[in-house]
Amino acid sequence: MLLNQFLILSAVLFGCGIYGVLTRKHTVLVLMSVELMLAAVNINLVAFGAYNGNVAGQVFALFVLTIAAAEVGVGLAIVLLIYRNLRSADLDDVDVMKG
Amino acid sequence: MVAQNVAFGIIAAAMIASAIGVVTTKNVVHAALFLVVVLAGGAGQFILLGQEFVAWVQVLVYIGAVIVLFLFGIMLTRAPMHPRESLDNDLKWPGLVVSVFLVGILSALMIDAFDDTEIELEAPTRTAEVSSELFRTYIIPFEVVGILLLAALIGAVVLARKD
C-alpha cells in the first residue's frame, strides 16, 4: 500500500469538512463537519504511524479522539444554550454582535 | 497486497461518498448516519494499516458516543427533518472553491513529497505495545488529556443545566 493513498483520502475528507463548516447553517451540522475534519486528521496520524513502524501515531490518534469527544460535549451544550435563548439553532440567527 | 488495495479502494469510495453526503444532505438525521459510515470506514482503514486498538476505540468513542450525542443534539434543538428551506447558507460557491483548492494543494504537496513511498507492514501492532508506550513515554500528555476531558464534561454540565 502506498502512503499517499491514505494521505489523499484524508485530504479529501478534510476538504469535505471545510466545505461543510463554510456552507452549513444549522449548528449541529457544523459540529458534524468539524468531526469529519478530525477523523481525517486521525487517518493521517495512523498512516504515518504505520509508515514509521512505531505506535506514536496511534497514541496521538487516541489523543485526537479524546479532544474530539470533549469538543462535541461542550459544543452541543453551547448549541443547546443558543437554542434555548434564541428558539432557533441556525447560525444566521446568531447575529447579536453584528453592527 | 492486491487484496488490501482493493479493500482500501472500496472503503475509501464509501467514505468519500458519505462525506459528501454529510455536507450536502437536506436531512439532519441522514447527515448523522452518513457520518457513521465515514467513521466506520476510518476504523476499517486503521485495521488495514494493522492498528487495531485505535480502530476499536474509534468505533466505541465515535460511533458509540459521539453520534449518540449528535442525535440527542438534533432531538433537543428540534432540527428540521423535512426542511422546506435549505440547510445551507449562500456561501456555497466560495466554499466549494476553497475546499477544492485546499484538496488540490494538499494532494499536490503529498504527491510531491511521498511519491512512491510504500507502507511496509510486518505484523499488526499489539495493544500491549500501545499501552506500554502510552503509560511510559506519553504519561504526562495522557494525564493532561484526562483532566481536559473532565473539565470539558463539567463545563458541558454547567452550561446545559437549567438554573
Image (spheres, coloured by chain):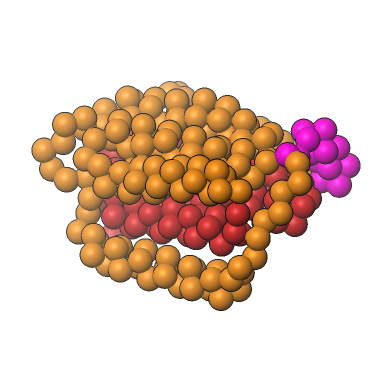
- Farthest-out residue, right: B136
- Prevalent SS, magenta region: helix
Locate the C terminus of chain B and report the quarter of the image it occupies. Answer: top left
Residue B3 found in image quarter:
top right
In reply to whether residue B135 is colored magenta, the answer given is yes
- Left or right, B36 with respect to A63, comes to left
Q: How many marks?
A: 0
Instruction: Report the residue at 33% width, 25% height from top.
Output: B76
- Farthest-out residue, front: B2
Instruction: Report the residue at 23% width, 60% height from top.
Output: B92
- Farthest-out residue, bottom: B112
Residue B50 found in image quarter:
top right
| Chain displayed in orange | B
Residue A9 makes an appearance in the image: yes
Instruction: Report the residue at 50% width, 60% height from top.
Output: A8
Q: Tell me where residue A88 appears, x and y as whole percent.
A: 25, 37
- Left or right, A25 with respect to A30, comes to left
Q: Tell me where residue A11 appears, x and y as whole percent.
A: 48, 59
**Foreground pick, A71 / B42:** B42
Q: Tell me where residue A78 appears, x and y as whole percent.
A: 43, 38
**Vertical position of residue A51 compared to residue B68: above or below:** below
In reply to whether residue B51 is colored magenta, the answer given is no
Residue A69 makes an appearance in the image: no
| Chain displayed in red | A
Q: Which residues are magenta?
A: B124-139
